Image (tube, rainbow, N blue to C red):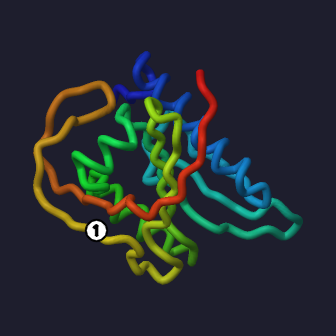
Amino acid sequence: MKLDVNTPLGQDAIKWARRGANAFLEANPHLRLVETDQNKPADVDGIIYTAKEGGSIKAVVELKTRYMTLAKLMEEYEGMWLLNNSKLERGVALALSLQCSFLVLLVLPPSKLVLAQEVSDDKGDLIPKVKTGMATTRATTNGGTVHRKVAYIDMTKAKQYKTKSL
């Protein structure tokens, strides 16, 4: 299986995702992030934990880079961000099994922003409005199309953090 990480666009998306994660962590200095191995498919992209002796897991995290502006997300898409429903279900289930939150960090490079939205709490309850449905979407970062079940996650109340430029 060829992973997106092995392509120029995949590498760029990862760079921006890491910038977004760094912006979030700079604003929350009591937290740290450990990523999953980028060379292997994983249910989530990392785990956020408290940065102290005896620290604890606070969230499983999904990092996504979308090459759109905040204005486009909020106006054209009415703040509803599309995520593969399978990713949503796996993130919520993993968070529930670890008794922590499922957090999404959505990086918008044209706006130099990262949006942080807690998607579920430690009991597996969804926090923002989430709608599901079938849609034809881009198959991967690198293109193609696929018809699958997707989740539309309300990002209108997500916290915003400024990212650094490339």
Say which of 125 and 106 sits in front: 106
Q: Residues within 10 Å of mark 1 (few under 14, many from 20)?
A: some
Question: In the rendered view, would you say 27 is above or below 165?
Answer: below
Question: In the rendered view, would you say 71 is above or below 127?
Answer: above
- Look at mark 1 in the image and give the residue it sits on: 130
Count of marks, rendered view:
1
Say which of 25 and 88 sits in front: 25
Quadrant location, the N terminus: top left
Q: Residue at x 33, y 31 (%)?
A: 141
Q: Residue at x 50, y 77 (%)?
A: 121
Q: Residue at x 49, y 66 (%)?
A: 118
Which picture quadrant has residue 163?
top right
Q: Residue 56: image x %, image y %?
A: 73, 70
Q: Amino acid at mark 1?
A: Val
Residue at the bottom extreme, as displayed: 123
Quadrant location, the C terminus: top right
Q: Residue 130: image x %, image y %?
A: 28, 68
Q: Residue 73: image x %, image y %?
A: 32, 46
Horizontally, residue 86 falls left or right of residue 108, namely left
SS type, badge 1: strand
Say which of 67 and 72 sits in front: 72
Q: Residue at x 39, y 28 (%)?
A: 4
Horizontally, residue 20 falls left or right of residue 55, namely left
Question: In the rendered view, would you say 70 is above or below 133?
Answer: above
Horizontally, residue 133 falls left or right of residue 4, namely left
Residue at the top extreme, as displayed: 8
Q: Residue 40: image x %, image y %?
A: 48, 38
